[in-house]
Amino acid sequence: MLYDAERGVALLGDEEIAAAVEVLRSRSLFRYYGPQLLGKADAFEAALAQLVGARHALAVSSGTAALECGLVGLGVPEGAEVIVPAITFVATVGAVLAARAVPVFAEVDDTLCLDPASVRSLVTERTAAIIPVHLANVAADMTPICDVAQQHGLAVLEDAAQAIGVTYGGAAVGTIGDAGIYSFNLEKNITCGEGGALVTNDERVWRRAARYHDQGGQFVTSTGRVRGDDTDDAFVGTNLRMTELAAAIAHVQLSRLQPMLESLRGYAHEIRGRLDDAGLTWRRIPDEDGEGGDLTVLLPSRRAAWSFVRDLRKNGMPASMFYGGRPVYANAAVATGATAWGSWDLRPDCPRSEALAARAVNIALGVNMTPQTLDQVEHAIREAARAGRR
Ligand SMILES: *Cc1c(COP(=O)(O)O)cnc(C)c1O
């Protein structure tokens, strides 16, 4: 490879190590009590809420856990329909099913994110929520999506697992709908190995999510310390808590986010600008000022896309199709229509998204790029585009 396409994980350094060691030395690895509790999870939540401009943040064990908490927090009832985009990571679907709701697949448009018109056409009296996914550091076109939600009284839960730090119209993704989630898995913008967070401005959503993630309020309410010990709206939950170690690392990584995205955005703008004359169709980016650095090309056909990938890889570029060039309902597990406790009615019907998934090629950028790598990237893409025209 010409360069390393990693993001936050490439920036893990002495500060993260010091933060982890500090927690180990305190012997207080659990967020709610310990011999010398440092309050790392609390501090991380406060810092995250401030960074994205949300009233509340809840740190949890993964992005998937955050989605599940979000659906519970929003009060999505059992059996309700939740609209998700046909192109996304399998976790978006799995979390809806884990929350005992039913995923309904909507088309994406040339942003590769939810198509608001498709969402509108899928709304039924059973629809409770919409999950727009901000795919690969590009915000979905939230204004028309939120308009549809508002017209039909639907909740919007933003899946910003792949886009923490990205903005749309000046607002951080995750804070535009009723609630939003981030992931700190190893592959995301910033990482603590495994981790996630829910953000919301709605105190009730936050309170329900917090209760759910902590066994129905096992520790927060028994100590009466953090989130009050009110007993209205009580229910049994599960354990999706974040550890102090993860929170300490994620907190340091937060400080790396904005400079990192600024440079990645700069690289993407520079390369797309230089390739203005190369006859390529780029994915539509609703807000280029807020993107997190995307290079995604829409080729004319599946065949052209695969040969574009091959040519780029030959030149050392980390190029790939999203999820093998197929919609999420083609994922082997999703396609079974089975969950661990029964089956659900999978209705895979997004021909436009299938075609787009087969034509979209993503070139990952990395934080350690240099002016010389930019030249090489420009050259490799130009060559692959030229080969495709022959
Ligand atoms: C990674 C990801 C998730 C899940 O995050 P985890 O932390 O891996 O559980 C959810 N949605 C999308 C779109 C993702 O890319």
Image: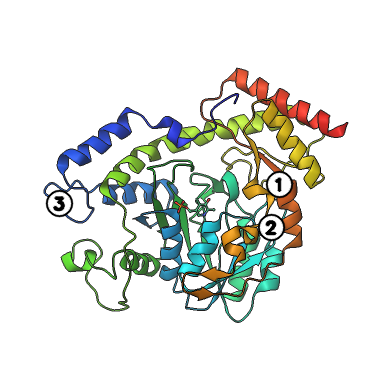
Residue at 37 percent across and 64 percent down: it is: 206
Residue 27: image quadrant is top left
Residue 372 against residue 365 in the figure, above or below: above
Q: Quadrant of the C terminus?
A: top right
Task: Please state the horizontal and vertical placement of residue 78, each as a whole percent of the image.
Answer: 48, 78
Residue 122 against residue 284 in the figure, above or below: below
Q: Earlier in the sequence, mark 1 or mark 3?
A: 3
Residue 99 against residue 37 in the figure, above or below: below
Task: Please state the horizontal and vertical placement of residue 101, each as a whole percent of the image.
Answer: 51, 73
Q: Which residue is mark 2?
A: 108
SS under mark 2: loop
Q: Is residue 260 left or right of residue 152?
A: left
Q: Quadrant of the N terminus?
A: top right
Residue at 63 percent across and 71 percent down: it is: 346
Identity, as a three-letter code, of the amino acid under mark 2: Val
Query: Which circle, 1 or 3, is nearer the viewer?
Result: 3
Task: Please state the horizontal and vertical placement of residue 376, each as a whole percent of the image.
Answer: 66, 21
- Give the spatial CA distance, label 1 vs label 3: 49 Å
Query: Which circle, 2 or 1, is nearer the viewer?
Result: 2
Q: Which mark is residue 34?
A: 3
Q: Is residue 62 visible?
A: yes
Q: Which residue is mark 1?
A: 284
